[in-house]
Amino acid sequence: MERAWLPWNRLRQLGVMGLNERNADFILPYNSRRNFPLVDNKLLTKALAVEAGIPVPELFGVVEIVHQIENLKELLAPYDDFVIKPAHGAGGEGILVVTGRHGGRYRKANGVLADEEDLGHHVSNILGGLYSLAGRPDKALIEYRVKFDPIFENISFQGVPDIRILVFRGIPVMAMIRLPTRLSDGKANLHQGAIGVGIDLATGRTFSGVWHERPIDQHPDTGGHLSGRCIPYWDEILAMTAQCHDFSGLGFIGVDIVLDAQHGPMMLEMNARPGLSIQLANQLGLQPRVRHVQAMISVPTVIAERVQTAKNLARYTAS
Amino acid sequence: MRGLHVKLLALLLIVIGVSLCWFKVTRLGLPLMPTEKAEVWTVEARIEFKVLKDAAIKARFYIPRQPGGFTVVDESFVSGHYGLTTEDDGLNRAAEWAVREVNGHQVLYYRINLSKDPSIQPAPSQANTAPPIFVPRLPEALASAAKGLIEDVLKKSADARTFVRELLVRLNAQSPDPNVMLLRQGVVNEDDWVRLISDLLATANVSSRPAQVLVLQDGMNHGALKPWLEIFDGRLWVSLDPWTGEPGLPEGGVLWHIGNDAVLDVSGGKNAKVEFSVSRRAQDRTLVAEERARKMGSRLMEYSLFSLPVSVQNVYRVLLMVPIGAFLIVILRNVVGLKTFGTFMPILISLAFRETELIWGMVLFTVLVFLGLTIRFYLEYLKLLLVPRLASVLIIVIMLMAFISVFSHKLGFDRGLSVALFPMVILAMTIERMSLLWEEMGPAEALSQGFGSLMVAALGYLCMSSQSLEHLIFVFPELLLVVLAMTLLLGRYTGYRLTELWRFRSALRS
């Protein structure tokens, strides 16, 4: 194909999807507003996922009103480590990870110790709606802290790496793994400085990564090589994400999966407005794949068939 | 399918908007630019007379009907305690001032503002039939001279118009024949001349009537009407120059009165006289057009924003600019891809800039946000609940505003007073979001978004304070349909944002 010169024509040629296109052609027609609460509210998502038989991090408790903060100590007593997160959080904000206890205090993921009052303030911020969309009052979830799979040992700096899979009409279309760095402060968000590493849908093997929109092959903090790693349970992961489409009723979603050392893959959360950085991590445009899926007259109902479709799709439209 | 629907809708809106606008420009003469000026002539007739002892006064003064080639912008009478009536008999209009008891020297004024407009036809006159001709009784000598002249002229003319022209050629001749010399002897002033022509025409069986014309001349003082002539050409009355025979009115002439009567008639007074003064000035064309449209009875203008009280008009002058700002935001966010605090927050800030002016507005905004942020970081340390914290920020912002106003007033910068016009709730929210962003994404991101919002607000201010844009939208509010159409079209824009070209630059490079 002749190389287009104008930058927008060139992007179009590469099949890169832009935010306007995502909003107008995919989110508006495929994601019914009615179903947004199912994914925006992590409590609901969790309940639906459990019902559908999808593994999720265990829920230890919910704080719904400010008054309950007084009982936080008793609520947390049985657990050494846990995560506190807002039910309506977005972009990984408001998540507090406690990795253990030290004296009467809690050790946070970055090593800093926090006391009862700090935790209480964080929970009250969550309840007040600081981290929720549009600042509405929210609930705080306390759940199992994922201990990540040793495969990520030397390519992750604090925090938990998660696998983001974009699912369109129930068919996974693109995947990446997001690795926290010192810069991203343990968060797995690309624009906060996490590394995005593309994953070959067909094999579950990682490509090289992208950090700050620049190609990278070594983790900047740990030095571990990014490419060529095989994600375990790959087929199960694909199947889980395909199932997530079924219970959410949303056509265009991003599903976040974490790999726990003991429990294997678990679904962390879903996003009805998935970001487009996944294209950067894979160095591949989304358009050819989503347009192919869009053109399918009907999508197979059997999960295994959808996983197969996804793998074939990846083979035909690899970069 | 949906795309086509939006495009058709947008097309419809654009067609409606543009054609309404076109109609207003071409038919009603509304100007597209605010600087367009129309020439407005102010004519003032000053009537003065002395009251006879113990007499009731009745002053009758002829005033123009709709003159051809001019729009009457407005008309006024200064009549003190006189009762005033105007009447229109289908040929002339007259104003009649009346009062029962008055003493001494009296002055009355009639003022009319006229604007040149070649498309205006004179008001139709009812009397388009030839009146019976009274052949004047001329003295014997004159009668035979007239007869001789007319016989000569008749031979060389085909109709009323050519007859008059030929007659005037003879009368004006450098070396007149004896008949003409005789006729010219009795003429001392312009009125006599017109009467002579009129008499000659009557003798030749051509209907004519004298008329009075005011020739507009800037700076004219103590001016008088100029006698003119109208003849009946068999179908219509036509004006013509009683000296040259040229048809029509003189350049810049307003037909004031037709007929033999005096223009001013005062009963109960003496030494009555009327003087005209004329001045020219440039006036906003919008006002002229609006006045004209109202005279034409155009429904469109009757229901325009100009029909509102002036204070409400001024509110709408501002409000109607908000869509322009909103459209700017749509472009900056969906086509350029800028990030701002809040969707329409920058527009509210730029509305505040309208009052404070740009540079001062930006300085005050920056100072307020900076002070607010500093205090907000202190509040963070107190670990307050969300809503009380927001409320505290709001209270502090208002106190800061009051402080800045008082402080700058003491220092003598009165500009600082306008800080009170900033939407404080918006400011408090901006400070809160900025501080959150500061904590979560770092100072660089917070400052860049803050700076971006300020730039968008400044850009919004520049668009929304543009005089010509404001004029255009206020005079042609239907253009908002075009703005709406373009916004709808952008609502289905699926192309890349400019910032995405940067975001995906690594893909472009490969």
Image (cartoon, rainbow, N blue to C red):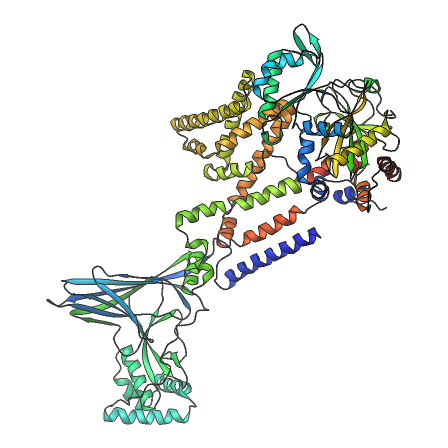
In the picture, the quarter occupied by the C terminus of chain B is top right
Front position in the image: A300 or B139? A300
Is the residue B52 above or below the residue B238 in the image? above
Q: Residue at x 59, y 18 (%)?
A: A68
Q: Whole-percent x and y of residue B28?
A: 47, 62
Could one spot residue A154 in this view of the protein? no
Is the residue B257 above or below the residue B333 in the image? below
Front position in the image: B465 or A62? A62
B272 sits to left or right of B387 = left
A284 sits to left or right of B172 = right
Q: Residue at x 58, y 50 (%)?
A: B483
Q: Residue at x 44, y 27 (%)?
A: B404
Res. A122 image quadrant? top right
Q: Residue furthest front?
A: A51
Q: Residue at x 75, y 29 (%)?
A: A51
Q: Residue furthest top?
A: A103
Q: Whole-percent x and y of residue B414?
A: 40, 32
Is the residue B71 above or below the residue B455 in the image? below
Res. B289 image quadrant? bottom left
Q: Whole-percent x and y of residue B393?
A: 50, 25
